[in-house]
Image (cartoon, rainbow, N blue to C red):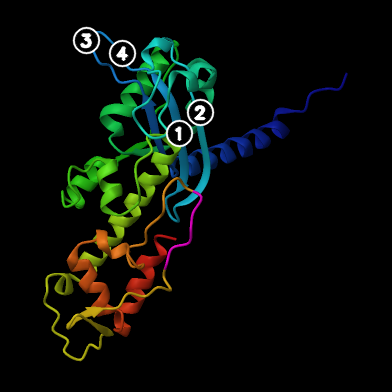
Amino acid sequence: MQNPEPKEQILPTLYLEMEASDDSSQERAAEIVFFDLETTVPNRAGQRFWVLEFGAIVVCPRKLVELESYSTLIRPGDLSAVALRSGRSDGITREVVAGAPGFEEVADQIFSILNGRVWAGHNIQRFDCVRIKEAFAEIGRAAPVPVGMIDSLGVLTEKFGRRAGNMKMATLATYFGLGQQKHRSLDDVRMNLEVLKHCATVLFLESSLPSVLSGKWNDSTTITTRSRSNGKLMCREESSRKSPTTSLGYQRAVPYARGGLGKMTERVKNLLCKAREKPALNNILKHSHSLLR
């Protein structure tokens, strides 16, 4: 049997491991996890919510690069609470979740992807976070804890206003031409990210060029490319900026692709038409376009 190493030789190794662990914790805390739950909907007093699906995407906040994702169906404790047929497209039915794992079987994965990160999602503060705590409490485990929270419902209501209607995810998706909300966790998380990118682009343009968006375009030397249609001058939209087809459950719409401007405000449309030929604005438009790639 070999003699153990002296403490003087062991302590530096332990110190390095602790230092590496701290770096890892700091890096993890800087990551944002967008997540969404699908649940049963109580239709009478005394009924509870059951989690049916969990989906999450971890992103780097500096580049919005997807670092990892996880999704799982979850079998509720009471299968009779799940409808035999779903009234939604691609909805979750009793048959779909009958063979899924129970929450206690996926709790470790859910805890791992949520704990110690910034949580983000649409209306998560009042709904999803509450359901997560309830689910962990039911199996006698401590719930994951965020280091911060971004609820896009509150943020967009404050920053973007109600120009898109009631600010529900389905309404926002329709406003930007992103297709129908699928009400499946991972699809809805991806749609949430796309909505945020579109809103950020509009707000970026409005804050960068307020005089243009308020109709105070004073530069008479600006040259715009126009074509006539029924005697009226109309800006010609470029077809070369079409967004490529994606593998998502909806078609991603870029605000300045052909047909994409239909869902944007008239002020933004006029901005893009007028600014297209202005060299000083090209960098701004290219930057806002890169946000959606």
Residue at the spot 26% in from the left edge and 84% down from the top edge: 226
Q: Is disc 4 placed on a helix, strand or loop? A: loop
Q: Which mark, by number, is residue 55?
A: 1
The answer for how far apart the CA atoms under marks 2 and 3 are is 28 Å
The answer for how far apart the CA atoms under marks 4 and 1 are is 21 Å
Q: Label 2: few (<14), some or many (≥20) within 10 Å?
A: some
Residue 44: x, y in percent?
23, 12
Quarter of image, res 188 = top left
State which tag comes first along the sequence, 2 or 3.
Answer: 3
Residue 171: x, y in percent?
25, 44
Q: Is residue 53 magenta?
A: no
For the residue pair 277 and 3, the one nearer the viewer reads as 277
Q: Which mark, by number, is residue 72?
A: 2
Callouts 2 and 3 close, C-beta under 8 Å: no
Residue at the spot 20% in from the left edge and 52% down from the top edge: 160
State which tag comes first along the sequence, 4 or 1.
Answer: 4
The answer for how far apart the CA atoms under marks 4 and 3 are is 9 Å
The answer for how far apart the CA atoms under marks 1 and 2 are is 7 Å
Indicate which label's residue lies in the foreground, 3 or 1: 3
Instruction: Please indicate whether residue 81 sits to the left or right of residue 234 in the image.
Output: right
Callouts 4 and 1 close, C-beta under 8 Å: no
Q: Which mark, by number, is residue 218?
A: none
Quarter of image, res 284 = bottom left
Callouts 1 and 2 close, C-beta under 8 Å: yes
